[in-house]
């Protein structure tokens, strides 16, 4: 049976602000806990007007405290911004407080919206150190692999009486899929803004090249489940407009769906909107989204589907997750 999960990017409403977006994450977590989703991950972004979560390691603890069975994790920690030892100790601390419910997803970007923000985040002036070496250090400190040559072995990693949580590699390409396979890690592939066939090929390559005991492939999709097809497309409009504005160099928080639908693109917005590949987006009624999701997950051989459902109205996001849960058999038809 396919596992279903949710990735929260902390969508910010233009007339409310990022503080409320963090509170919305707590409300979402409680709903997902009731609806039968396996896990909720939170993403790391910096300097992005439509994204509120800059410190996922802090939010994860709060999310775990207001839920009972839901696994909570980072989707992910952007490793170039962090010292590998500190990452492992942060997540071991979370594991000690919430045993068996924490995940550590690792990404290779900075999560920043521009070069200036990225340079302020990087620990090493002048650029990133080798991502593979940083990842190897995380795995070594976590007790999941050997130390790379020249690394400071013999360090006591605290708390040392709890295991490190599972490490998952995040990516969006065949190259990152091969890295996950080489390290023997679960792999979460983001299919947003690309040909679905590329996502299918990357996850198939991950399985072919996997070196370890058991592969686990997570397909991350943007999905909005409305009352019907028209409503599903409408609640997707706020996020899609924010994406275009970000790419056009005019980042904005999310606008209400009716404003997003009525928005007339500027010339700069049209230039970035026209080439955007939205073929992997799932926006529609429950039957349409279920059919498209099932087809893509089956083709990719995904063990798990994780959805991103950013909306202007946080109630629309919860309702979308509820409709999806009902459509795929996670929840009863009556909302909790």
Image (cartoon, rainbow, N blue to C red):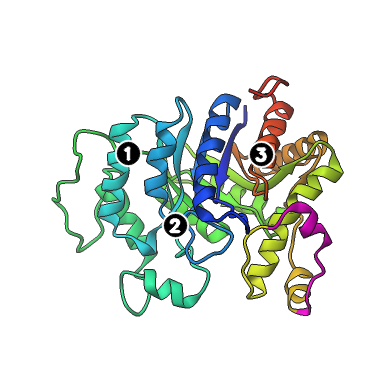
Residue 109 point in image, percent of width and height: 47, 64
Residue at 52% x, 35% y is 29
- The disc, 2 or 1, on the residue closer to the chain's N-terminal end is 2
Report which quarter residue 135 is drawn in.
bottom left
What SS does tag 3 mark?
helix
Query: CA gap, disc 2 to disc 1?
Result: 17 Å
List the residue tagged with mark 1.
Answer: 94
Query: CA gap, disc 2 to disc 3?
Result: 23 Å
- Which stretch did the figure color magenta? 255-267
Query: Would residue 264 be counted in the magenta stretch?
Result: yes
List the residue tagged with mark 2.
Answer: 54
Q: Which mark is residue 315?
A: 3
Indicate left or right for 113 with 158 as reference.
right
Residue at 56% x, 45% y is 7
- The disc, 2 or 3, on the residue closer to the chain's N-terminal end is 2
Residue 268 point in image, percent of width and height: 74, 78
């Amino acid at each position: 049976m396919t596992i279903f999960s949710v990735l929260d990017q902390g969508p910010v409403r233009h007339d409310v602000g990022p503080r409320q977006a963090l509170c919305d994450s707590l409300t979402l977590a409680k709903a997902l806990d009731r609806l039968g989703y396996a896990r909720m991950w939170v993403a790391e972004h910096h300097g992005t007007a439509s994204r509120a979560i800059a410190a996922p390691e802090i939010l994860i603890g709060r999310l775990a405290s207001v839920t009972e069975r839901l696994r909570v994790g980072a989707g992910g920690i952007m490793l170039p911004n962090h010292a590998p030892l500190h990452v492992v100790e942060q997540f071991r601390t979370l594991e000690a407080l919430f045993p068996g419910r924490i995940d550590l997803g690792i990404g290779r970007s900075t999560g920043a919206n521009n070069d200036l923000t990225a340079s302020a985040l990087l620990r090493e002036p002048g650029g990133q150190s080798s991502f593979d070496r940083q990842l190897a250090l995380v795995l070594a400190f976590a007790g999941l692999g050997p130390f790379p040559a020249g690394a400071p072995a013999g360090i006591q990693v605290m708390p040392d009486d709890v295991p490190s949580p599972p490490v998952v590699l995040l990516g969006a390409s065949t190259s990152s899929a091969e890295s996950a396979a080489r390290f023997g890690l679960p792999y979460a592939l983001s299919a947003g803004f690309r040909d679905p066939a590329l996502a299918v090929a990357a996850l198939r390559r991950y399985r072919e090249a996997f070196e370890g005991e058991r592969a686990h492939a997570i397909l991350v999709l943007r999905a909005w489940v409305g009352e019907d097809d028209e409503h599903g497309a409408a609640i997707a409009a706020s996020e899609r407009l924010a994406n275009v504005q970000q790419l056009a160099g005019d980042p904005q928080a999310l606008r209400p769906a009716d404003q997003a639908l009525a928005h007339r693109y500027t010339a700069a917005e049209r230039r970035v909107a026209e080439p955007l590949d939205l073929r992997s987006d799932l926006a529609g009624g429950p039957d349409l989204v279920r059919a498209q999701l099932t087809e893509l997950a089956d083709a990719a051989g995904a063990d798990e589907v994780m959805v991103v459902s950013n909306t202007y109205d946080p109630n629309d996001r919860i309702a979308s997750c509820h409709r999806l849960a009902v459509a795929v058999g996670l929840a009863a038809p009556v909302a909790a």
